[in-house]
Structures are given as structure tokens and as C-alpha cells.
Image (tube, grey):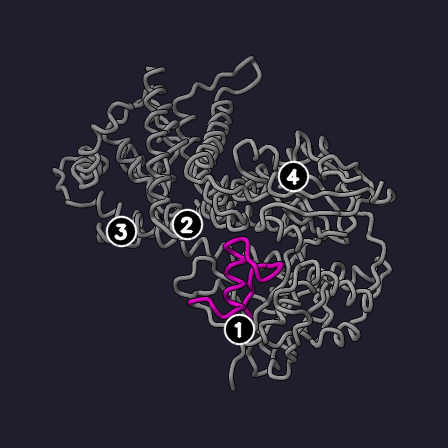
Amino acid sequence: MTLTLQKAPLHTPLRIVAVEGAPGSILRVKELGLIEGAVIVVRRRALFGGPLDIQVRQTRVGLRASDDIQISVELINVPAAA
Amino acid sequence: MKQFTVALVGTPNVGKSTLFNGLTGLRQKVGNFPGVTVEPMVGTVQVQQIKTTLIDLPGIYGLTPSSKDEELSVDVLRGTHPHIPQPDAILLVMNANNPEKCLVLFSQLAELGLPITIAATMIDAVKLEGGTFDDITLMHKLGASVQSVVGSKGLGVADVKNSLTHVESWKTPQAPLPKNAKVEERYKWADEVIAASVIHGTPSPLTQKLDAIFLHPVWGSVAFVIIMTLFFQSIFTWAAPLMDGIEASVKWLQDAATLLIDQPMVRSFFVKGLLGGVGSVIVFLPQILILNLLITVLEECGYLARAAFVVDRFMGLFGLQGRSFIPLLGSFACAIPGIMSARIIPSYTDRMATIMATPLMTCSARLPVYTLLIAAVIPASTMFGFFSLQSVVMASLYVVGALSGLLIALLLKRTLFRGSVVPFLIEFPPYRMPSLKSVGITVVGRSKDFLKMAGTIILAFSIVLWILTEFPRTDAPPTASKIEAEQMQIENSYAAQFGKTIQPVFAPIGFDWKITLGVLSSFAARETFISAMGQIYASDVTNDDSNLRTVIRAAMPLNVGLSILAFYVYALQCVSTMAIMKRETGHWRWPALAFAMTFVLAYTASFVVYRAFG
């Protein structure tokens, strides 16, 4: 089951399946370690659709979900085919 | 022997500036490269007789820049910068606790064919968390020397210094990946290298515990408001005694000069032109120092990135992003450091909109003007038997200024600075105790910059103002008192002629020629308004506030006072701000636009207030 990052559950290990968007924007996202296959945890969401607090490896990233960056994730314990 | 130049490079938040400060101490300055808008810091490292130049380049993640700062680093490293020559070698700073990003950067730096040495910081944190860091294996895997340092404690810094003075023996690593490798491939390679050389420990729960508060949707905002309140409170309360001290010293020097110098013109030049001008600048030094100190501490301890996260949504309402909050915050003390800190915003349009909004944040130079006028024209009564009316007026001036600034940013983002939105993306560094030495070095450095830049411009204008008020000379009749003679001198001076010529423009908003002159004179620096009013009203030769307040209270109706206040909320009357705006935006067009825009706003607001209370 693939989810957008905005809809993903908090405090749950997730695997990134795709990082899409404007090339300029997604390069930085990838450089910070948010690449396909990376395991992440969304720690919290700011109020009123504000940015997300994401943990990837040892790095903590604040990211405002927008049309320019679409990150799709899957729950790690669920088989990809399901 | 050739003096080598080494570039200090690293991803953001790795303790790079702490290491730079540790390596160079106070032997550093803002690099003075002609034609460079973003200036890197340059320092000298010396061991015995051998010196090496160290350039502290802004943090980068790779060789594809996304901000002005990063562009500078990449251009210098590639040797394509028009003014700064390519360095001879690279000192790459790695956070041992989070090394993958650094290796991704390393894999690209190795393509440049320059010798590289790696300084691994935060080794202490790795060990504290029960991890291990095998520098020998890492060295073999990378083909570059790896040295361990604990920058905040100064351990290992001497070894790095030593190797910096033997650049000729540095190794040039082979690029581990093809030039066009994707980020994903680079991470894969980095993961393999790290798997062989580093074992991550269990991260200390401190950062997570603190973030549970500071990033919490509700408590995070509460904490933000509390921290910001303390922030401003400290700037004003801590600075007050220092500012009083500086004012008293300047006054003492002026009195001494008055006694010592006989020739009246020379005396006036020293007392009013030189000391008055210098005094009006250095009186703000305590605020600038404390502001820089607090911002540096907040930044180094890791809170500033959290604050940007908390306010991102709010800034989004005005088309800006969380990072814009830092320059706007700084502008409450002074727009100059505020505008300079806008460099951290990667998006050009966001940065420009933020810079254009900074002059509307109430800087500390407006404060003395507000204080004087409010005390003079607003009755000292209370609202609802609780709030002092004067404080309410003061607070509303701050709020109106800030909101107008944000609305201007929104307007500009919708018109001139449209274009692609660069999304808010920020890395949260772990919380850590700032290194006192490093903070001190940064604060002293920035304050020196301020004094040098603002000092020269404000001093020049102060001298010009002095010439305009002291010439042409008027011969007062011998029967006139000293004060009457001064008054006659002012009323016939070039300044008065100029004020009177321009005054019709300001007549609709209630300014007489004296106020017009005061307003014009504050273009050198807003606080000059007070000394100018003091000179112009000449009630007393001293610029004593309480006397001036009484004179103004008698001479100025309420609506004129409010009209001046409204004008000061908006008008961009600060040559130094315009100069720095030009430097940071690269063109006179932007300060000119900001000036025109704020002038129209100021005039309109004054007109409305003048009529409404008339």
C-alpha cells in the first residue's frame, strides 16, 4: 500500500518508494538522505498543514509538504504487493 | 615558501564554524575580495613560521548549489569564481555522528582533483552514545587522511593545525564514483563505507525529549513565544545600562572638548559633527552585540532551526517560509544584520521579498524617536485602568510595522517575486552547548563589521549635516544671548533653507520646516532626529531629553506628533540599510523601490492620522 507522506501515520517506520517533483527541489531532498528505499519515521506534523518533522538515518529534517515535492511511502511491515 | 590556501568545506550543522574559530582564533576577517557580494570568512593558521590561509566556505551538500551562499562555495571549489582563486586543497569537516551526508559530498569533491583531508568532529558524541568510529579504515577506504577533533573542547585542533601547515604532503583521493552518478548511487557507496568503519550508538534521548516540547504543535508555539519575549526583553534591558554608559561618556567627551577648544568653529565641529556623529553610532553597539550574541547562541544550540519549523506555517500566510523569520527577527534590532542574514534563504524570490520587508520591522534606532514623541504628545493616562496608554501606543507601533512588512512581502510575492516556490526544507541539528570561545569570536567579528560599515556612512552624514547647519555663518547682534545666536544660526543655515524649500511637500501631513529638517536629517540614521530636533529647537545647548520633551510638548499638537510617529513606522530613512540592501541584492533598483514604497506608505499613513486627529 503506497501512501503520500502527508497521509502517513506518525511514529511508524516507512520506506520511501518514490521521490517526485521539480528537479531543483528534489535534489536537496535526496541529498539530505530522503531517497528511494530509505527508511524514515514521521515524528510530528505542525498545526494547520504546516511542515513535517522527519527522521532519516541520523538526520532530522523539517519539510513543508507541497506540490513541488511528492514523497510516496509504504508501511514497512506490509508486503509491497498487498 | 608558498603560502597555501585551504578551503574549509562541509555540510551544514557539522561544527564547521566552531572548528574554523578554533583553528584561526581572532586571526580572521571577512574576506575582502573585490566584486564579491557574499563574502566568506578568511583566517590564517600558523605553526612556527609556516602560515596557511583558510577560507571558510558556506555549507554545501553537493556541487549543485541551491542558494547564493552555496553558489559561492561551488564556484570557488571549481575554480570558476571570477575573483576568488581556486584553493590548493580542501579540509572537509565531517560530523562523525552523521557521516553519510558528508561522504556523499566527498564523492563529488574527489572529482575536483584537489588534495583532501577530513576533520571528523563530534567523536565524543559517538563514543558517548556507545558507538565506534574507525578512522584508519575510513582513511583506507577514502584515500584521504582522517583526523579526529572535538571542536567545542579544542581536542585534536592542534593536529589539524599541524597538517594544515604541511599541505604539500596531503593525498589527492580518487573519485569513487563516475561523475554523473545519482544521489541514490552515492548514498549506496557511502553506506558501504560507513558499514565498514562506523558503528552508530543509541542516540541520546536529550534531543528527542527537547523536541517533544520545542516542536510540539501547541507547546512548541508557546515555547517560541516565551523565548522570543525573553529575547527582546534581554536586548532592551541588558543594553540599557550600557547605552546609558556610552551616552554619558560621549557627553563627557563633548563637555571636555567644549572646555578645551577655544576656536568656536573647531569646537563645534568636534562636539557636534564628530563626537555627535560617532556617539550616535556606538550607542547602538550594545544592542547589536547582544542581538548577535543571542542569535548566535540560539543558532549554535540548535533552537533556531526549530523556531523556523514552528513559524513556517505562519510565514506561509504571507508567502514566505520559516527561514525568513530569522532575518526579520534580527531586523528588530537593526535591519543591517537582518538583511545580511537573509542569505540563509535558498530561494531567490523568498529572499528578495524578505529583504524588502526587513525595513518595516521596528529597529532599535526608531525606539528613541518613539520614546521621545510618545512621552511628549501622548497623555500619561491608563486604558481600562490597567494598561498605560503610552505603552499601548508603543506596542501598536511595533505590531503595525511588522504586519505591514509581512503584507508587503505577500504583495511582492504575488507580483514581482512570483515564480517557483522552493519548499521549506531544514535540517535539525542535535541540541548542544554552544562553545563560548566560538560564540565570542563570531559576535566580536560581526560587531566589528557593523561598526566599520555603519560608522563610516553615519559619520560622513553627520559631518555633512554639521556643515549644512553651521553654514553660512550668521553674525548675531552682540545683544543676543548664546541660545538666541544658535537659533539664528540654524534658521539661516543651508539646512533651514533646504527644509523650508521642501516643507510644502510635507505641509499636508502637518510638518513645519523644523520637523521636515529633523525628518530629513534622520536619513543618516533615525536616531539623529533627536539630536537634530535638539539642535533645531535649540531650547538648550544640551540634547537633554527631558528639556526637549517639554519644548516639543508645548510646540506640537497631538495630531502632528502622531503624524510623525506614523511616518517613522514606515519610512525607510536609513542610508546604511539602503547601502546594505544594494550590496545584498546586487542592484540599486531594490533599495530605490523599497524607499519609494515605504515613502508612499509613510506619507499616506501620516496624512490619515493627521486628518483623523486634527
Q: Amino acid at mark 2?
A: Thr
B245 and A47: which is toward the camera: A47
Q: Which residues are magenta?
A: B54-82
Residue bearing mark 2: B585
From the viewer's perspective, is residue B383 above or below residue B6? above
**Residue B111 point in image, percent of width and height:** 61, 71
Cα gap from disc 3 to disc 2, whole angstroms: 36 Å
Q: Residue at x 42, y 31 (%)?
A: B370
Residue bearing mark 1: B87
Q: Amino acid at mark 1?
A: Pro
Q: Residue at x 52, y 80 (%)?
A: B3
Whether residue B450 sits left or right of residue B166 in the image: it is left
Q: Which of the two labelled residues, at mark 1 and mark 2, occupies the earlier sequence position?
A: 1
- Tag of residue B269: 3
Considering every residue shown, the one lying at the far top of the view is B384
Camera-near label (1 vs 4) is 4
Q: Which element is circle 1 on? A: loop
Give the chain letter at badge 3.
B
Residue B275 appears in the rendering:
no
B217 and B568: which is toward the camera: B217
Q: In the rendered structure, are the residues bearing label 3 and label 2 in contact, judged by CB atoms less than 8 Å apart?
A: no
Residue B157 appears in which quarter of the rendering?
A: bottom right
Quadrant occupied by the C terminus of chain B: top left
